Amino acid sequence: MNSEIEVLRDYIRRHGLRFTPEREAIVKEIFSRHDHFTVEELYLSLRRSRPISRASLYRTIPLLIEAGLISEVFQDSGQTRYEHTYGHEQHCHLRCQSCGEVIEFHEDTLEALGQRVAGEHGYRLNGHRLEVLGCCPACQDKARARED
Amino acid sequence: MNSEIEVLRDYIRRHGLRFTPEREAIVKEIFSRHDHFTVEELYLSLRRSRPISRASLYRTIPLLIEAGLISEVFQDSGQTRYEHTYGHEQHCHLRCQSCGEVIEFHEDTLEALGQRVAGEHGYRLNGHRLEVLGCCPACQDKARARED
DNA sequence: GTAATTGCAAACCGTTTGCAAACCG
DNA sequence: CGGTTTGCAAACGGTTTGCAATTAC
């Protein structure tokens, strides 16, 4: 259990870095959440249990991405939203461009598609990101109401 | 010909806005390029032929997106990159996360996939965005060299 | 002991905004 | 003419960075 911590320890060991309480707390907090979080949201919830600076967060995020624990999901009015991806199947996002609602869904065929496209160009595949963009039922209703 | 200008005129007429030389120049410049541009790049190239302010660009971009002429492609170290999409088939991007190289490719099956997923959740479909992320041959070589 | 990490505050930089002048329809 | 758009410059806000103190190994 807590295998995400092991992944972090491994990554840190292999790169000659230091395993700090801050980094441990960040990873634990991230893996206790199940949402698309911003750095600010992460900062506020971590702050409730321990002191930490935003700078440490901003410096830790790229490291966690490198280690394969989290990834960027999308931009949300200027802020980057992340999710923990380690231990999860890849999934895609259906997003309402009007209210920002996000629905996740799986699509098995994309893995093979990614492999094929990457292979055709000699790329090493890291992953893929599919967003289906649209307008959710509620926002369609609102738009309709506005036109009357 | 110049149908992107017609699209803009239509959009402007329908919304009670004004057709200005600035907007015309912006659209012309965008459709003469065939790359993934940032606002700053657009600003610099427009500036070569006429005076324009960054503010006008930043205010015009959302309008062109609304009108269906351009779309955001991805974030590139903090800046948003756009491309003109009107009159083009939807396409996907294979991107090297190390050097930023982008290769475009078509994938017909995604349209149907988008339709299906949107339909299943009552969404009106606007489009989709697929990025395949990886590491290009050149950057793989560099990484390998670094490890020796 | 020594190099890595932290926290703080200031710097950065892409983007947004208030306002007065210019301009489209 | 009236409401929209422009340019300017200042403000904004998320992210990065320099630096001195602290800490992991």
Image (tube, coloured by chain):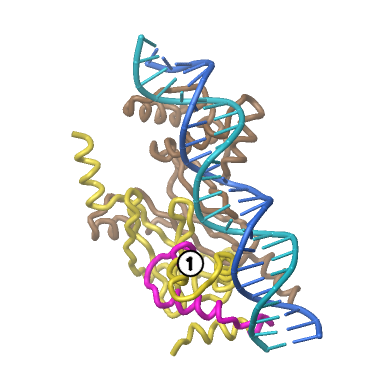
Chain colours: A brown, B yellow, C cyan, D blue
Asked whether residue A87 is in view, the answer is no
Q: Is residue B145 or residue D4 the one in the foreground?
A: D4
Number of labels in the image equals: 1
Quadrant of the snapshot with the C terminus of chain A: bottom right
Q: Is residue A109 left or right of residue B125?
A: left
Chain at tag 1: B
Q: Residue at x 39, y 39 (%)?
A: A66
Residue B18 among magenta residues: yes
Q: Residue at x 32, y 27 (%)?
A: A14
Above or below, B31 relative to A79: below
Asked whether residue B117 is in view, the answer is yes
State which region is magenta: B13-42
Above or below, B141 relative to B94: above
Q: Residue at x 59, y 72 (%)?
A: B63
Q: Is residue A102 or residue A81 the one in the foreground?
A: A81
> Around disc 1, counting alpha carbons within 10 Å, would you say few (fewer than 14), some (14 to 19), or many (20 or more)?
many
Q: Residue at x 62, y 57 (%)?
A: A101
Above or below, A41 relative to B55: above
Above or below, C8 relative to B40: above
